[in-house]
Image (cartoon, rainbow, N blue to C red):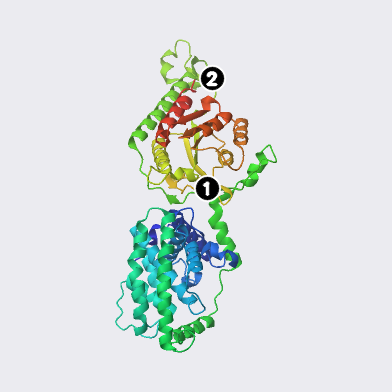
Amino acid sequence: MTSYSKYWRTNYSKDKAVELAFGLRALRKVAGYLGQNVKSVYWEGMIDSSLKSRSIVIDTKQIQNIYPIAFNTFDIMVGQVLKEGIASIEWTEWVYEKVYNRSDYMSDLLEPYFKAIISASENIYVYEHSKREKIWSLYLLNYIKNETKHNISDPSFEPTPQSLADVWIGKTILNKAYNSLHFYFLLPIGILNKYTVKIQNIVQIKSVGQRRDTRIDIYIKLWNEFAAAILKINNWIVPHSYPNLIFKNQNEQNMDEQNDLDEDQPYSPLDKDIANQVLEEVDQDMADLTNNIIKVVSDPQAGVMPTIFKKGIAKSNTKADMHQVARLKQIFKSQESLIKRVKKRQFKRGTLEGKLDPKRLYRSPINGRVFKLRENKSPDYFWHICIVADASASMTGKEGHNKPWLTAEQVFISLAAAAKGFNNHLDIFSYCEDKKKCVLTKLFHGNTLYSVLPTGQTPSGQAILGAAMLLKKKYKKTMIIHITDGASNCGLRISEAISYCNKNKINLYTIGCGCNFQTKQFLSQYFPPKNLFFMNNINSLAAGIERLFNQTMLVLIK
C-alpha cells in the first residue's frame, strides 16, 4: 500500500506519549485544512464518552503499541479524519436524523438496514466530495479498503445489513466484481445501483444547504424503495409470518466468533497519565487569554467573552500579488533609508573624546579633534506591525461573487513577502466568534501564511485587546491595523480595547472595507479621523495599508 502521510508527519518519537502527541497534532492539521466546522480530533480515552458524538475519536488499538506510528497505519487514520471531517462540514448527522424521521418504513427489522445503507450512501457521497482534491480521495480509498476488509461477510450467503452495504460500496468505490452473489442480493443491490449516480452528482451543487437538502430527498426515496424490497425478501424466506430478521447466516456466525476472539484480547484506551501528557504537548500552541483580558478591563461589567488564541494549521493556497509586493517593498526601503539619515545626524564629530572617527584622522596633528560622540541613544525606528483581520461570516461573501476573505489573504501574503528581509516585525491575526468564544488565530508564523474559514459574529473589541496583549514588548513603535467590513456585535466594547492601547502607547488604526452607513457611523464614534480609513471595498485594502504606512512609518521619522 502506497503511503502518503510523510507530508503531514515531520516529527517522530519512539516515546509513546510524545509520538501520540505528534500524531494527534498532524491529524488536527489535516482537519484544519478541511475547515473550521470540523469536529475536534482525539485519541480514544482522551475524552468522556458523552463528548464522543461531538468529536472525531481515533482508536489507538490499530497502532499495536509500535512507535513511531507506521505510515500505512497513519494513512488510514488520516482517511478517518477526512471522512468524518467532510461529514461534519456536509451535515451528515443532520441529514441522517431528517431522513429517519421522514421515512415511511421503520421497524426493529428495518432499523439495522437503515443505519447500514444511509451510512453507505454518505460514504459514497463523501468519497465523491473528496475527489475535489485528488490526495483526499486516495486517503479515503485506503480507509474504506481497510474498513471493508474487517467486515467478515460472504456475499454467497443471504444478505445482512452490513453485507449489503459492503457490496454496494465494493461495486461503487472499490470497483469489485462479485461473481457469486446470493440471489437475495439482486433486488436490493439493483435499487441501490439505480441511485448511485444521483448521489455522486450532488457534489456538483455549489451551496452546502442545497447539497444537504438534495441528499435528504434522494435518501428518502432510496430508503422507501429499498425497505419495501427487504420486506419482500423476508416474506420469501418466512411466508405467512410477520417479517422478522433474516435467518442468522454463516456471515453473522463468523462475525460472532470474531467478536468472541476480540473479547479474549483485553483492550483499554489510553492511560490517563499518557492522555494528559499528550494533551499538554498538543495544546502548548493554544492559550486561553480570558483571565488576562479580565485583569486589564476597567469595567467589571464589560461582558468579557472567553478568548482563545491559537496558531493557524491550514496553509493558505493564495498567491502573492507581485505588484503589491513591489509597492510595499518600496515603502520599507524608504523607511530604511530615512532611518539611516536620522542615525547619521545623531553623531557629533570633531570632539576631544569618544569613538575614533576615521574620517578626521588627518586633523590629528593640528588639534587632536579626531573623535565622534553619539548625542543620544538612537530610538528604535522599526515597527511591530500587527494585522487583526475580521474573519466573521460576512467575510465569506455572497454566492457567485468575489470572496472578501480570499482577497484579504492575498494582501496578507503580499505584505509578508514584502516585509521579508527588513527589520520590522509582522504579525497577522484573524478573529471570529465560534461557539460563543472569541477565537484569535495567528495566521503568519514560520514564514508561512495560514488560512481560516470565516464564521460567526464580530467580537472586534475582544480581538483587538487580545492581540494587543500579545505584542512584543521590545519594540518601542507598535501599531495594530484592524481590518473589518462590519461593526462589532459581541464581546467587549471597542472602547475598552482603545483605552488599553492608549495606556500602552500602541497605535491603533482601523481600515473599513465596504462598510455600510451604519458601520461607518459606529466606527467614527470611537476612532479619530487620522486613525480611521474607509475603502470602497475589500479590493482597495492594499491601497489602504500603503496609505497608512506612508502616514506612519515615513512621516514620523524626524
Splitting the image into 4 quarters, where does residue 195 fall?
bottom left
Query: In the image, what residue type sits under mark 1?
Result: Gly
Within 10 Å of the Cα at label 1, are there few (<14), some (14-19), or many (20+) other Cα atoms?
some
Q: Position of residue 277 (x, y in %)?
A: 57, 61
**Answer yes or no: do the residues labelled 1 and 2 have beta carbons within 8 Å?**
no
Looking at the image, which residue is at 42% across and 88% down? 237
Q: Amino acid at mark 2?
A: Glu
Check disc 2 and report the residue beneath it. 375
Q: Secondary structure at mark 2?
A: loop
**Which tag, 1 or 2, sits closer to the chain's start?**
2
Frontmost of labels 1 and 2 is 1
The residue that label 1 is drawn on is: 456
Query: Residue 346 or 542: which is nearer the viewer?
Result: 542
In the displayed structure image, the side of residue 40 where residue 72 appears, left or right: left
Query: Residue 152: where, in percent of width, then height?
Result: 42, 81
Quarter of the image where one finds residue 375: top right
Nearest the eye: 419 or 214: 214
* Residue 22 in sight in this render: yes
Disc 1 element = loop
Q: What is the x, y in percent for residue 60?
A: 50, 69
Q: Image quarter for residue 422?
A: top left
Q: Residues within 10 Å of mark 2 (few under 14, many from 20)?
A: few
Q: Could you tell me residue 186's position as x and y percent?
A: 34, 80
Residue at (55% x, 35% y) in the render: 474
